[in-house]
Amino acid sequence: MIIINVKENESIDKALKRFKKKFERTGVLKELRNRSYYEKKSVSRRNQIIRAAYRQNLYVQENY
């Protein structure tokens, strides 16, 4: 459970922004999306390798 202490004279917008930031850091939505369907380990590993290759390619292009 995420708890946000609202300070005196703090606007609702600032408190909501802090809540959203804290919620994002916990990774709840990411975990929910991952659990929405089952993915075989071989498929997830393949996707992980593809993502890593893509990131590495971007890094190489940026440095040349």
Image: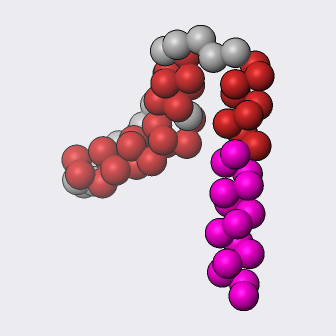
Q: Identify the image quadrant of the C terminus.
A: bottom right
- State left or right for residue 10 relative to residue 4: left
| Quadrant of res 45 | top right
| Quadrant of res 34 | top right
Q: Relative to 54, is 29 above or below? A: above
Q: Position of residue 8 (x, y in %)?
A: 30, 50
Q: Which residues are magenta?
A: 50-64
- State left or right for residue 51 relative to residue 1: right
Q: Relative to 20, is 53 above or below? A: below
52 in magenta: yes
49 in magenta: no
Q: Could you tell me if residue 7 is visible in this image?
A: no
Residue drawn where x is 39% and y is 41% of the image? 19
Residue farthest to the top, as pictured = 38
Total tally of numbered discs in the picture: 0
Residue drawn where x is 73% and y is 51% of the image? 52
Q: Could you tell me if residue 35 is visible in this image?
A: yes
Residue drawn where x is 50% and y is 21% of the image? 32
Q: Nearer the viewer, residue 62 or 33?
A: 62
Q: Position of residue 46 (x, y in %)?
A: 73, 34
- Dominant SS of magenta comes to helix
Q: Position of residue 37 (x, y in %)?
A: 52, 13
Q: Relative to 52, is 31 above or below? A: above
